[in-house]
Image (cartoon, coloured by chain):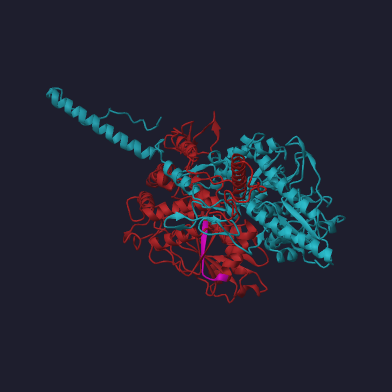
Chain colours: A cyan, B red
Amino acid sequence: MNNNGCRTGGGGGGGGKPNLATPLLLLCLFSSLALNSYFCSSHLHLSRRRPLPAASGWARSAAAEAEAVAAIDCSGHGRAFLDSERAGGVPVCECNGCYSGSDCSQLLLDCPADLDSGDPLFLEVYWQEHAASSAVVFSGWHRMSYITNGQSNSFISDELDKNIRLLHQVVGNAIVDDKLIILGAGSSQLINALVYALSSSSSNANSSSPALVVASIPYYPFYKAQTTLFQTRHYAWEGDASNLVNSSADNIIEFVTSPNNPDGQMKHSVVRGAAVIYDHAYYWPHFAAIQAPADGDVMLFTNSKVSGHAGSRFGWALIKDEQVYLRAIEYMQLNTMGTSHDTQLRILKLIKVMIAEQGGEKDIFEFGYNTLKARWSRLSNLISSSNRFSLQQLSPQYCNYFKKIRDPSPAYAWLKCEREEDEDCNKVLENAGIISRGGALFEAGSHYTRISLIKNQDYFELFMKRMEALVSNSSSSAASA
Amino acid sequence: MNNNGCRTGGGGGGGGKPNLATPLLLLCLFSSLALNSYFCSSHLHLSRRRPLPAASGWARSAAAEAEAVAAIDCSGHGRAFLDSERAGGVPVCECNGCYSGSDCSQLLLDCPADLDSGDPLFLEVYWQEHAASSAVVFSGWHRMSYITNGQSNSFISDELDKNIRLLHQVVGNAIVDDKLIILGAGSSQLINALVYALSSSSSNANSSSPALVVASIPYYPFYKAQTTLFQTRHYAWEGDASNLVNSSADNIIEFVTSPNNPDGQMKHSVVRGAAVIYDHAYYWPHFAAIQAPADGDVMLFTNSKVSGHAGSRFGWALIKDEQVYLRAIEYMQLNTMGTSHDTQLRILKLIKVMIAEQGGEKDIFEFGYNTLKARWSRLSNLISSSNRFSLQQLSPQYCNYFKKIRDPSPAYAWLKCEREEDEDCNKVLENAGIISRGGALFEAGSHYTRISLIKNQDYFELFMKRMEALVSNSSSSAASA
């Protein structure tokens, strides 16, 4: 098992004469053997270096520490983490918004219900209920190298690559066989990597003018913000895709977000001949019916909206063309030299759980769908009783994953204030103690505003209470008018 | 402890008449109480949602799995990881370069000693020897949110911020009190974030010409590669700093790498009035004497070269000016929306171990210094016997951390081929089975080449064997000439 050719015995000191007393000879021989054995094992130790620890229980104290932190009572309105701030050596509770106190038991009065961001905390409770299967232990020496074995430029482990493909296959939301996978720190990082890759690809590289980057209104504001900040001479933000429907330009990059953020509609490319980046962040059974596997040449996904781990910063793209893939890899190498291997190990574990539980009682998609369906149903029932507000139209649809017709369960409500005087819908909600994201950011006009339905239950309940009051006040003021 | 005002009892159904039979009354009362109790606890369950798991041993199976993987025998020339490819359900060994076989016991003949990259695997054995203290358990619900509590734009936990400062204080390599900390996916990401921040800062923003980005030769090639790829109209790569020593331009950004990569020299700014980014990646006791705490306005550090976890992609910058900090934060928000919280937790654990062990028998700096000192000593002894090659000059220096004079222990050997005909030194080594990084990449001419001394021991031993043969052949060919 080692190649040092080192054997116990052999060699030895100068030959003792045969006529020496036998006991002395034996003593010498044994001493020599012992010395040889010592040197040999020392040499062995040096050349083999230190062995990995055996199953000696080295991970036990870390496990006990994590369990102790998980048992800290934060009244169901918060949680302590291993890296939470400490008081007296013990991590303190980090409370959900609008909750306070050392155990998060105090509801703060006049605290706004913050439904601005797409923070996917609606799935936190799922993982709390699957603690044993989703836990993962990091050894101190886990993947210290820049690269994974034998893959000098892709920075992804074979096992993770395999399991991402498997997840798509069991969900049926993307065709993976003819695609390459590239990882990013969230899909955020990949958005610009793909714009770079497509604007520098062979068909565009010879163009003297920069590639024009567009999306259909309403669109996710991040595309514009990022492309504008990072634009080079190779590409620039152009805005509304509908302005280029009849364009003859040959270097257009179009973002197609489907289901769309903010309004949950299934979208298609509108610019003929554009290089399309399909952002399928929300094309999972939590949020939409899976009608057919997506098969775009360039498709984006993010773990933030599948397992809900936005804090891990982990996304991936499926890319058909190898040249585009290699350009994106080049971007990743020079931007961050790959993606955290720590995150990769953790995400692998989470993906394995999602695959193992799919179709059963603990299916995360069933859980996510049921949670969001219930939220949407409560909200849309409320709004339907009001003529001050309206919501986007979504219909039940057959879902290949659930093998049944499913109700709408969008990630966001795209609320419209119908009264002319409610020009700034975001402001109307803000005055009622609800923080949303104004429609102007999505280039859709300020009569619209986006409400996140994927945050934690505390915020959703607070939001519903405020919204009920708002609708009720609106009705009574309309009645008294 | 809960704020629902829910009490067992109270309320109840319609009032029973006082003249009803007592047993019936009691039955009703108890039934009502029981129902109240049931509804109350249901409501409680709903509003408090599911409690966090108690200390029920949920982390145990993950710990056992990690221990089993760590116990897989890879002959000291490799290791299996939790996310290694699997055969029969068991992770397979990932062998060090030039080793092969299912247990990594076979040394491959004619395999080049690859000392090209700065992969810091020399520290892997340190962490293997400190398995218990450096292990960390991730719960499935660890920090799923984009942001840490109450810090909407910095993406760093208070606990990590505190411990990074503490690490600098115990090592004495940087003044932290008047600085802000920003995290990145390696210092790689921060390099461009800082160029962006400095080129867009108030003094440069009004300038019509792009900021010029420079470094002194020989310099780390990544600065040029990244700045060139990502350049915007605000900045551009300009090359050698010495060309701008007498420049009157007011928008110059200078990289000062100290100790320098590739040659380990302590460097200073050469361009008067430049905005300086001090890259102190190697300013740790492993690699250099700590002579005084660094106090630049903008300083870069990376975990890759402190704990050796390059695969984690984790670096940080200390920034004095708040405006520069905020511009860098803006870049981070739009590039990757912060840094993986998974990585942050793991790095926190590693930093805590480094702080706890400093000055004692298990001091990582003592370990790192001793390892690299021994390598440098062996190599420089060998090279001193040759007139075909030479190395950079490094002297023993007093180190405030060790409180003694320490020998040189650089991360890289900066080798020069002295013979005129050895024009391409990188090629000379390549022909002898050694992969290095040619001097041309550092703009220093091809008579130089960089040899990484921080990779694993297997590569270093193979390299020394090849180098000994090369030096010996050179001497004998010189003698016979």
List x then y, in percent, for residue B145.
60, 53
Q: Residue furthest front?
A: B19
| Left or right of B46, for residue A21 | left
List x then y, in percent, for residue A331.
64, 53
List x then y, in percent, for residue A413.
75, 54
The number of numbered badges drawn on the structure is 0
Q: Residue furthest bottom?
A: B248
Whether residue B415 is visible to the viewer of this picture, yes or no, is no
Q: Nearer the viewer, residue A121 or B124?
A: A121
Q: Nearer the viewer, residue B320 or A151?
A: B320
Up the image or down, A5 lies above or below A145; here it is: above
Q: Nearer the viewer, residue A52 or B131?
A: B131
> Does residue B316 show up magenta in the picture?
yes
Q: Main secondary structure of the magenta part?
A: strand
Up the image or down, B396 lies above or below B248; here it is: above
Q: Residue at x 35, y 38 (%)?
A: A45
Res B287 quadrant in image: bottom left
| Left or right of B307, for residue A434 | right
| Left or right of B65, for residue A368 | right
Magenta residues span: B315-322
